[in-house]
């Protein structure tokens, strides 16, 4: 159930994985949510649609590796959909990141995301 104060707001989020198994068995997708959030105003719905999966993939990858505080990670594809998140969010885990891109034109973007070292290969 969506809280009253969020009615008529632009939301995005993630659905429960159970509905992906047999959607018609469980009614509508809107009924089963794990996470709802206000959609960032600078994104349209198409752009916001990919955020939950990108965030979950990044979080899951970093958490499963069992990094310790202060360790260094190498992010390949540092300005891609998933790669851009660890570059800017490693401070959350107190990690250092070196991120790589094959596009010289995207080096400045990668630096602006907060990676400790941007590598152009």
Image: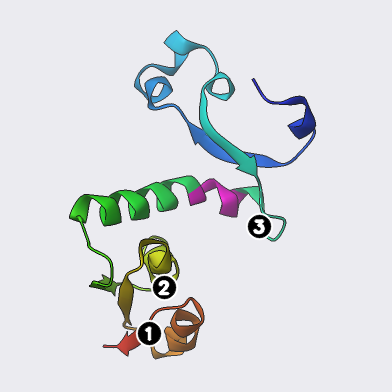
Q: Is mark 2 in CB contact (under 8 Å) with mark 3?
A: no
The quarter in which the N terminus is drawn is: top right
The magenta stretch is: 46-51
Q: Disc 3 on helix, strand or loop?
A: loop
N-term mark: 3 or 1: 3
Magenta-colored segment: predominant secondary structure: helix
Nearer to us in this view, 102 or 16: 16
Q: What residue would you read off at disc 3?
A: 43
The quarter in which the C terminus is drawn is: bottom left
Q: What residue would you read off at disc 2?
A: 79
Residue 84 visible: no
Q: Residue at x 43, y 52 (%)?
A: 55
Q: Is residue 24 above or below residue 116?
A: above
Residue 100 sits in quarter: bottom left
- Cα distance, mark 3 to mark 1? 24 Å
N-term mark: 1 or 2: 2
Q: Residue at x 66, y 48 (%)?
A: 39
């Amino acid at each position: 159930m969506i809280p009253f104060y969020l009615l008529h707001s632009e939301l995005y989020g993630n659905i429960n994985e159970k509905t992906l198994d047999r959607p018609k068995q469980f009614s509508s997708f809107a009924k089963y949510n794990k996470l709802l959030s206000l959609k960032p105003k600078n994104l349209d719905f198409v752009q916001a649609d990919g955020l939950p999966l990108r965030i979950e993939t990044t979080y899951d990858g970093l958490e499963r590796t069992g990094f310790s505080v202060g360790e260094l990670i190498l992010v390949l594809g540092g300005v891609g959909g998933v790669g851009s998140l660890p570059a800017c969010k490693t401070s959350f885990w107190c990690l250092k990141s070196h991120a790589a891109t094959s596009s010289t034109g995207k080096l400045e973007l990668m630096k602006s995301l907060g990676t400790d070292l941007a590598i152009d290969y």
